[in-house]
Image (cartoon, rainbow, N blue to C red):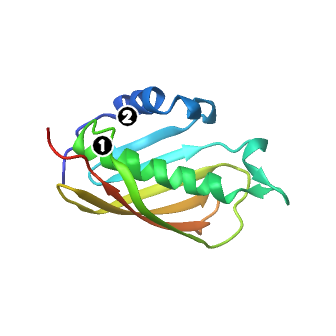
Amino acid sequence: MMAAALTTAELEQILVREFPQSSHLDLEIEQAGDMTARLRMPINDSQLRPGGTVSGPTLFWLADVGLYVAVMAMVGPKTQSVTTSITVNFLRLPSTAGLIAEVKLLKLGRRLAVGEVSLFSDGMADPVAHVTGTYALPPEA
């Protein structure tokens, strides 16, 4: 078991400071550390696409932020970590009940972190999307 470098409160402060444009989304970090994270995000009308389903960019955004949170939880406030690749597989239509991201880091090295995210609609047992991604970590100063 690997200890977390940052608490959920510290991670939420980083998101508010580094990504103020997303403060209106009411994202909640339920858990972060030990190479995992769990985030919850309510859905509002601005995140829906024609047909009344959650938009792909919303799912992508939550998965990307989930990976960022999981990485920061383990390595500390290396806020200049960036996504180098991400793949989203949309599996089924999400409901508008809210989204849950369950993140697992598969590898955490000195320069790269690789992880996967399962996205769920609140109340649904099966995932609505599966995401894999890689983050580049900034070099040690």
Residue located at (34% from left, 29% from top): 10
- Residue 65 lies, in percent from the top left, at 47, 47
Name the residue tied to disc 2.
11
Mark sitting on residue 73 = 1
Secondary structure beneath label 2:
helix
Residue 73 sits in which quadrant? top left
Mark 2: amino acid: Leu
Sequence-first tag of 2 and 1: 2
Residue located at (76% from left, 51% from top): 48
Mark 1: amino acid: Ala
Direction from residue 90 to residue 111 in the image, left or right: left
Q: Does any portion of residue 122 appear in the rendered image?
A: no
Direction from residue 57 to residue 49 in the image, left or right: right
Residue located farthest toward the left when viewing the structure as drawn: 141
Using the image, determine if residue 84 lies above or below residue 77. Answer: below
- Marks 2 and 1: CB-CB under 8 Å? yes
Using the image, determine if residue 44 lies above or below residue 24. Answer: below
Using the image, determine if residue 96 lies above or below residue 46. Answer: below
Along the line of sight, the residue nearer the viewer: 83 or 29: 83
